Image (cartoon, coloured by chain):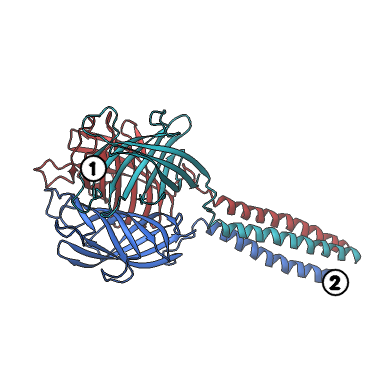
Chain colours: A cyan, B blue, C red
Amino acid sequence: MMRGDHTSQKLAFSFILLLIIVLASSQSALASKKPLNEKSPCKRFVLYYHDTLFNGTDAANATSATVANKTRLGDFNFGMLVVFDDPMTKDNHLLSPPVGRAQGFFFYDKKNEYNAWFAFTLVFNSSEYKGTLNIMGADLMPQKTRDLSVVGGTGDFFMARGIVTIETDTLQGDFYFRLKMDIKLYECY
Amino acid sequence: MMRGDHTSQKLAFSFILLLIIVLASSQSALASKKPLNEKSPCKRFVLYYHDTLFNGTDAANATSATVANKTRLGDFNFGMLVVFDDPMTKDNHLLSPPVGRAQGFFFYDKKNEYNAWFAFTLVFNSSEYKGTLNIMGADLMPQKTRDLSVVGGTGDFFMARGIVTIETDTLQGDFYFRLKMDIKLYECY
Amino acid sequence: MMRGDHTSQKLAFSFILLLIIVLASSQSALASKKPLNEKSPCKRFVLYYHDTLFNGTDAANATSATVANKTRLGDFNFGMLVVFDDPMTKDNHLLSPPVGRAQGFFFYDKKNEYNAWFAFTLVFNSSEYKGTLNIMGADLMPQKTRDLSVVGGTGDFFMARGIVTIETDTLQGDFYFRLKMDIKLYECY
């Protein structure tokens, strides 16, 4: 009988242990619905985007061109649409070897201040990464940093999602600007 | 021996209880792969979108402008491209205080009836919400309601996804229309 | 006492069994964070996309039109923007009954070779499927196959995400081309 008592005590203890495991597993199951933490991307890297707008004579250097002219709505280029195939570099030097291309478009869309809207694909074809990231969002230019959405990826970035935080790194007249892009992925597969 | 029987009965009962918990936790684990229910968004709100197209002289009121003219393909504005920075209000009054802006573009894209395609960002900067929602999809105008995709979000809407159900609330000539937007998020973090 | 031993042996065995179930459920909970496998879409089908560009006189047949002309940046149509409402068929015959429409736009965006960028909605309204899939990405034309992102879906494709692998099936002069689209969804609800 003593041994029976021992057995049931051990079993009771095991039950509690098991219950903890079960609840832990249950919690991780529930947690899996909300696994994303803004401060903990599963992948993160910074690249610089260089936009050199075609001025009509510099086709050798230019990597973007105006496709639709600004309208007469306000004084901030409302409606001006630019298509680009811009180099992405690891540092902020225009002539550094590109590690990818940003292909897409932006247009200005505010009548009383500068504001733009972007949709583009980051295309990687290097030893480091092969694949693409698809990105869209508003570029609220008066703010120091602006967040765009990474809405999908392919290749090494299969099904990725995340946030790209952009910041104007330099602005040189009408024909060159550079953005720092802090690319943070929260869904990696 | 009777006490041993009792113990094993209790244990058997506990096992069944435990098994139910385990299966429940296991089910919620499996369920977490498909947690989305069209009728149960994690966040939902209705806003009204007001598009006032620039007619060439009303820059003070206009919030959108034609960037590319319609083509000669059909009689339904095929190819006409409009960039907008439109106010979003809680009720259907154009002059209500905006709670956000819709910044993006649409174009008409059907030759034998009206049909449009939208991509835009809802920009919030109020006491209620700060952040953005990025949206795209077809506006099948002959249908009473049409569903667009919320493909990403930032700030208070970090990594959100969902559906925006739009409905034409009014259409006044060529220069003003209003959409009711029922914004339903199914991924909230 | 023998019976007590038996009981505890049985219980020990049950514990091990239960532990396996618990660990399995726990693992499936963890696995649910990364359930996607590139080779195992939850839905897959192939469709053909037919683009017949308006030449100014064939409005009856044409399903797309140039909205912004190419720029003088390079010799590969940089900046030429086309809006389309193109039929999708199950086989590669232009005149097969369409099972859906692809509504959206593309533009060329490279100055030293052909390259395009697409954003569009697949619209289904058949006995098989009702709903939409929203798609965007770079069309790196020199590559045999290119991957675009399915960034959202509605109706029968509620909240879907995935990859569309496109391949040029034929190219006939300036006014007709056909893409094979292998649509693979990895998030189905």
Q: Residue B160's quadrant in the figure?
A: bottom left
Q: Position of residue B9 (x, y in %)?
A: 77, 70
Q: Position of residue A177 (x, y in %)?
A: 34, 39
Q: Quadrant of the N terminus of chain B?
A: bottom right
Q: Residues within 10 Å of mark 2 (few under 14, many from 20)?
A: few
Task: Identify whether B161 is placed above or below C37.
Answer: below
Q: On the picture, is C18 further left or further right than C100?
A: right
Residue farthest to the front, as pictured:
A173
What number is the disc on residue A73?
none
Q: Amino acid at mark 2?
A: Arg
Measure the alpha-carbon separation of dots 1 and 2.
80 Å
Residue farthest to the right, as pictured:
A2
Q: Residues within 10 Å of mark 1 (few under 14, many from 20)?
A: many
Q: Position of residue B44 (x, y in %)?
A: 41, 66
Q: On the picture, is C68 further left or further right than C31?
A: left
Q: Amino acid at mark 1?
A: His
Q: On the picture, is C75 further left or further right than B43?
A: left
Q: Chain for mark 1? A: C
Task: Identify whether C162 is placed above or below B51.
Answer: above
Q: Position of residue A95 (x, y in %)?
A: 38, 28
Provide the residue designation for mark 1: C50
Residue A104 seen by the camera: yes
Provide the residue designation for mark 2: B3
